[in-house]
Image (cartoon, grey):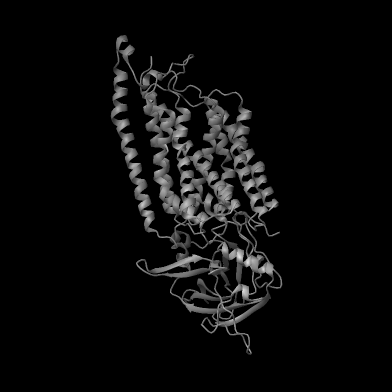
Amino acid sequence: MHRRAAGVGFRRHALAAFAVVGAKTASALYLPGVAPIEYGEGDKVELKVNKLTSVKTQLPYRYYELPYCQPPVIQESVENLGEILEGDLIENSPYEVKMMQNMSCKVLCKQELTKAHKDKFKSMIDDEYLVNWIVDNLPAATRYVRRGTSAGTTYVNGFPVGVVRDKRYYVHNHVKIDLKYHAAPSEYWGFRIVGFEIEPYSIAQDESGDGVQCQDSVNYPAFELDQRNSITYTYDVAWAESGIRWASRWDNYLMMTGGQIHWFSILNSLMIMLFLSGMVAMILLRTLHRDITKYNELASAEEAAEETGWKLVHGDVFRKPRHSKILAVSIGSGVQILGMSVVTLLFALFGLISPAHRGVLLQCVLLLYTFMGIAAGYITARLYKMFNGVDWKQTTLLCAFFYPGIFFGIFFFLNLLIWGQKSSGAVPFTTLFALLCLWFGISVPLVFLGAYFGYGKETFALPVRTNQIPRQIPSQPWFINPVFTVLVGGILPFGAVFTELFFIMSSIWQHQFYYLFGFLALVLCILIVTCAEISITLTYFQLTSEDYRWWWRSFLTSGSSALYVFLYAVLYFNTRLNIEKTVSVMLYFGYMGLLSLVFFLLTGAVGAFASFNFVKVIYGSIKID
């Protein structure tokens, strides 16, 4: 069956939202499957076809869904789990390309056009579908020349199926295949392919003479779909030597988006982090130091009776929070996602993940999330034990099934929608079964193993005892209101990442390559520091107001940045995308909701742990009678 994954942009990079690679770093290493191939003159160069993609629908279709020329036997390339989930469907083609041999107006085949074929072409052209080809692991790129003030060259992945002008449809039935090669006889034998560009044309070929003429001129009009009952496919092949080395051949694809804005993104994030760091430093070095000194110098009972502030709640500050079970599970799941993100980025920074490794990013994310189940079980167990919880079996089951169940449920529902559209992006049920095996066969046992070690460890050492009777909380000023502080707390973590988020979403939904792993690693570090600092700051203000219910609020304060991520997704949808189909809209918001939930758990876990350690430190620094 030719059904593969979709949604698709999301699965393609997006949990690409978690990793990417510096072009020079990635290309410096020759890894299995992406080592350079040397061709001799006249050697066959295989041209493979991939899925048809559209930014407007986000639904991929098999290349041979349209009446293109087919080889005698269609063979699919072996795909890894990530490629299947991305919706890649790489197959052979009848194009004959040989090293260093130019061709002109080579006839591929002639196809009869039925009404169904024409309707399919029109639908694909209206939805702006792109054809994706591959030569020597390089995707086909179309070069566009910009005019005006921003003159220059832009490369777009793939080439259009056709164009529509004044309600007339024109199919690209002739292509010029521009291939670039690099030769270095002193270093290696033969030639290496370093460039692959396509120039598509719509031509009504002249078949009246002995051969076929396919010149793009006034004498040879464009191929208007409604005026023809058959279509002839032709192609040119042009080889040109290039000074580009094999290690740098991906640069044109990776420069499809400007890198200058990334520096502004980093600068913006650093300014936010420095602002928060200054605020935290002021609290720790001035206010908090003064508080601790004052509390430790109190001598008389009269002075003790008059004391105010965070010391008064020392007997309640580590009181078990409401719904402690789900809080422990949420923090544990957040640590699982954080661990997965950090290790994925490390792999990417060492050049183990690059655009040349199709599907490896997503496969890496899935496998690491599965194996990080042990961290989720361990953290959940240790927290629940500290909360004096007794229902450890149910808690561990929640950790193993609650959030992974939500992820899989959303994924399965969206996959059914894709399947209903007969898209080649639908994940086959065999792959769904493989995902379930990863979940039940590896992740769940690892969660229980982590929980076993967690419950076996000593409880977190707390600096103060908890009173039997809860202390009454005084009325709070409006600016300490939970809703207000939670909503305000999420703004700065979101502000630290929103510029980089634009590039990640462009790679997901506009099918661009996102490769700046170095930038992303730095942004992740800034995000972690920002989440920790904003949670610590607002937790301190809350304790100063004698409100000891900080557990959930510390989690939600930084976690609320996910709300702004989703709101930004709504803005991006309305300003950057032109998605109209109901299923495509549901796919977009379904996957962006999923991404927001992942972001919520990651940032919430960072904030909760930072506040927990902060509270432990400050209450361990004062004398308690």
Looking at the image, the residue that sits furthest to the bottom is: 210
Q: Quadrant of residue 456?
A: top right
Direction from residue 117 to residue 610 in the image, left or right = left
Above or below 239: residue 459 = above
Residue 529 showing in the rendered view: no
Above or below 456: residue 254 = below
Looking at the image, the residue that sits furthest to the top is: 301
Looking at the image, the residue that sits furthest to the front is: 166
Number of dots carrying numbers = 0
Q: Residue at x 51, y 23 (%)?
A: 320
Q: Give coordinates of residue 258: x percent, y percent.
A: 40, 60
Direction from residue 619 to residue 386 in the image, left or right = right
The quarter in which the C terminus is drawn is top left
Q: Residue at x 50, y 50 (%)?
A: 17
Q: Give coordinates of residue 363: x percent, y percent.
A: 58, 52
Above or below 556: residue 297 = above
Q: Give coordinates of residue 39: x percent, y percent.
A: 56, 75
Direction from residue 512 to residue 374 in the image, left or right = right
Residue 483 showing in the rendered view: yes
Q: Give coordinates of residue 349: x percent, y percent.
A: 46, 54
Q: Residue at x 56, y 71 (%)?
A: 168
The quarter in which the N terminus is drawn is bottom right
